[in-house]
Image (cartoon, grey):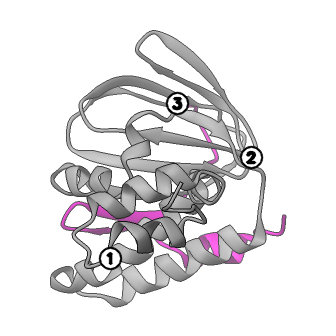
Amino acid sequence: MDITRQFIEQKKNLGKIGFGCGIGTIVEAPAYTNRSQKYNFVITWILKGSGKYTEDGQVYSLHDGCVCMRRPDRDYRLELAPEGGVRPYLAIPQSIYPALTCLIPELESLPPVWEMPYNDAFLDEFISLYDRIDALSSLELYNAFPAMVHYILRISGIEKSRAHNPLLHGRILLEEKTSLSVAEIAERCGMNYNT
């Protein structure tokens, strides 16, 4: 993993009408966050750093190569150690979260912390997403929503699990307002409609 100080310094934290994107760093004292998360969804990839995350009384260890997800209306405590962590994060307002869970229903059932080792392609996608959000005005942020959804699908591992679960993929296609017939959906999912 080659994340240079220059990259971190170049990428200021962006905040536009509730959307946020940036590279979090901790270099001095421990950081604590303890509150009811009522206003946004935050997904953070911990590339370097440690700490712990508590949700619903369950404690999860945070370390290099894991993802931490904070969902609206959940009480949590986040503690980050002061050893110079590096954490790309994406924040989406609570008002958008219902639409996000319609597109990615699996978000509600994921644990709040999971393993995601360093991956160049994922970091490149994050940097591209960051640059896209940075270039848009607050009124144009909806244009970046598909890229946000794609990043969340990849960093959460959902994209990969969907590829290996044709029934889930079929269900998602059936729930979408689409002009595809049931036979066409079955074919796209690699299933035989006639069985």
Report the residue marked by disc 2: 65
Local secondary structure at mark 1:
loop
- Relative to residue 103, is residue 67 drawn left or right? right
Asked whether the beta carbons under mark 3 and mark 2 sit within 8 Å of each other, the answer is no
How much space separates mark 1 and mark 3, taking CA atoms? 33 Å
- Which residue is depicted at the point 21% across and 86% down? 140
Local crowd size for mark 2, using a 10 Å CA cut-off: few (<14), some (14–19), many (≥20):
some
Which label's residue is closer to the chain start, 1 or 2?
Answer: 2
Task: Name the residue rendered at 27%, 38% in the picture.
Answer: 72
Image location of residue 177, percent across then percent down:
21, 69
For mark 3, does the 10 Å Cα neighbourhood hold few (<14), some (14 to 19), or many (20 or more) residues?
few
Of the 4 image quadrants, the one containing the C terminus is bottom right
Amino acid residing under circle 1? Leu
Specify which label sits upstream in the sequence, 3 or 2: 2
Circle 3 sits on which residue? 111
Bounds of the magenta span?
1-30
Q: Would you identify the image quadrant in which residue 61 lies?
A: top right
Q: Residue at x 19, y 80 (%)?
A: 138
Residue highlighted by disc 1: 180
Residue type at mark 3 is: Pro
* Marked residue nearer the N-terminal end (1 or 3): 3
Q: Secondary structure at mark 3?
A: loop
Q: Is residue 192 magenta?
A: no
One can see residue 63 in this view: yes
Q: Kindly indicate whether the residue at mark 2 contacts the one at mark 1 (C-beta within 8 angstroms).
A: no
